[in-house]
Amino acid sequence: MRAMRILLPALVLVMTVSCGPREVRSTVNAGADVERQIDQLLAKMTLAEKIGQMNQVSAGGDVSRYAESLRNGQVGSILNEVDPARINEFQRITVEESRLGIPLLVGRDVIHGFHTVFPIPLGLAATFDPELVEEGARVAAAEAVAQGIRWTFSPMLDIARDPRWGRMAEGSGEDPWLDARMGEAMVRGYQGEVPGPSSMAACVKHFAGYGAAEGGRDYNSTFLTERQLRNVILPPFEAAVKAGALTLMTSFNDNDGIPSTANSFLLKDILRNEWGFGGLVVTDWNSMGEMIAHGFGTDRKEVARLAANAGVDMDMMTFGFLSHLEELVRSGQVKEAVIDEAVRNILRVKFVLGLFEHPYVDEAAAASVQYAPAHLETARKTAEESVILLKNDGLLPLSSGRIRTILVTGPMADAPHDQLGTWSFDGEKSHTVTPLKALQERFPGKVVYVPGLTYSRQQRSRFDDVVAAARRADVVLAFLGEEAILSGEAHSLADLNLIGSQSELLAALKAAGKPVVATVMAGRPLTIERDLPNCNAMLYAFHPGTMGGPALVNILMGDVNPSGKTPVTFLRTVGQVPMYYSHTMTGRPYNGETLLDGIGPEAGQTSLGNTSYYLDAGAYPLFPFGYGLSYTDFTFEDITIDQDSYPVDGTIRVSYTLSNTGRYDGTAVPQVYIRDLVGSLTRPVKELKHFRRVRLGAGESIRLTDEIPVSDLAFWGADGQKKVEPGEFQLWVAGDSASGDPVTFSVR
Ligand code: NOJ
């Protein structure tokens, strides 16, 4: 599959966009011929036809309802139609019966797989394996394109540091570096090396700041400074745009008072002028209309004007452009040049995707592509790599020889829909392999299934039936967590403990005296501290998709050694939000002060230590970013760098010896962190700058060298410029963000 990239002749011409004094290379190089064709087409279009291109409609299921608008050229794109025959009919009316025959761009939320569902994006990030994630995105594109879908609203690149926010599930977690690598991989996977007729256009979203919703409540306002935007939130977007993403979506939130859909600083100054984005910008669903609710405009006409003038090209479901742009142009409130630019961006994407030459899909071929064995295989492998081992007292891997009876229990053991996770509209229950199914297949006659709780929120005070079954079993496998519906859009939570009576179920199982493995499937890092003592081992699987069952069973049985790493900090309690590894340092760093239980009733104010921590929850999370156990052990030794001092355009070569000192073959994920000790701004105490996956046999050692360009240490400083500030740095290599001993170097 890795070789299955789209290889079209590289287009030679480099387009540029003008941005004042300097010229920026366009991120979408369609070539001079295409730009000429766009100009010719544009010259033939009436204002109404141009505005029609800027209108996107959710048209699933009903062609006749839209036929008139299609014929009149009032629709540039549809979303939410997945039937290839109907998609062809939508196209046929548009291409053959509208005056100019400009094909439709057909979009769908293909977020982590189409029919074959992969782990949710947070699970994809846990693999720390961009190559495999790219392969998965290629599978998603192959299945969706086969049905006529040429545009997905993915990847979501919102940095998320608050697990209450349900949409943390849809992104790569808390770290800009990891997020950027995942974003680039997905863009390459969906679109291929050079976008063409077999590509699905990527849409980077939500631009920008959406993941910083106050209180973790979806859609909420954000208050990010320009520096935070530039240093934390925007780098993944820039990386994905520069990887060639053809489209971008504005976000629902207002940042510091300005809704993203009217934010010309983001959409013009940064996106177009600094990054040279050459694709199209679409609003989120009715995010133009929602500016009225925000209190940023009085009516649809006003918000249409604000959005168009800010740099939005396409309106998803507000119909503000369709209803008002013509009038706004005629009255001079929106210049026709603005419309022309938007339409150019839209047509460019349509040309690049080859839609003019290949508007139709081969209906007969579509079905055979779905759930192809190679797709299921990639989904299984990805799910395996996404699973994180959080605790193991030696019980895992299980040894099948000694097992006669396995008790399978818990609400997620056989939840075929829920293990697919949020945004899996097209994945089907009937194709999902649950842990129960996979175990029954592997151990015929040995599996006893007593769910205990049929759904996560169920309340139960006694578990006599489950406990009785546990006593008769050799091992207890409890599958806990949260259903798909508890995370995702609009599904924020204020309490992150295992919901319902699940913790009580686990405690009852432990009390039964048999070895217990808890597997948590969820859309976010739940606060599972109280559950850890009640199991011998714990696996964490962000909703793992179609092949989650076999993947988990392969890990439980040791066919696969777990290698997933936390893409986000796991908190002890929700009160620690936000807590993330790359924080800046306070003037009073925590130094191991007394917690509440060490403070006597007579204590005065000064005894509290005056450093930064919680009296009741300390200063540390439950598990740090980048953490995940293996069945084997790895050491990182003899870490050296090739120089003591580097020029700003130099490259740091860090070498280290990685050893597998345990009894099993396994995969390590060496992570390179740096710290910029003093800056014009306070700097993060650590920042991930490199990672890779390395497979090593039991007892093997290897000397590795990673290269870090010094330019990767640049940040937007106090003077508003992005550069590497000369000075002292630390660097270290470790298996997670909380370990490792630094070496020092300087940049001159
Ligand atoms: C709203 C969501 O915020 C966005 O992520 C999604 O792509 C659109 N709806 C389209 O379904």
Image (spheres, rainbow, N blue to C red):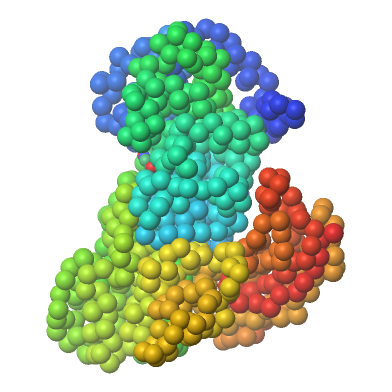
Q: Position of residue 479 (x, y in %)?
A: 30, 72
Using the image, determine if residue 241 lies above or below residue 347. below
Judge whether residue 569 can be spotted in this image.
yes
Q: Position of residue 592 (x, y in %)?
A: 54, 83
Looking at the image, which is closer to me, 559 or 22? 22
- Quadrant containing ligand 1: top left
What's the residue at 81%, 54% (across, down)? 648
The C terminus sits in image quarter: bottom right
Q: Position of residue 518 (x, y in %)?
A: 34, 77
Using the image, determine if residue 570 lies above or below residue 134. below
Give the total of numbered labels. Answer: 0
Using the image, determine if residue 24 lies above or below residue 213. above
What's the residue at 29%, 82% (across, down)? 476
Left or right, 168 with reference to 624: left
For residue 31, which quarter of the picture? top right
Looking at the image, which is closer to me, 578 or 625? 578
Judge whether residue 692 can be spotted in this image.
no
Q: Position of residue 98 (x, y in %)?
A: 40, 12
What's the residue at 61%, 43% (across, down)? 238
Looking at the image, which is closer to me, 673 or 547? 673
What's the residue at 65%, 61% (across, down)? 683
Left or right, 376 with reference to 428: right
For residue 445, which quarter of the picture? bottom left
For residue 453, which quarter of the picture? bottom left
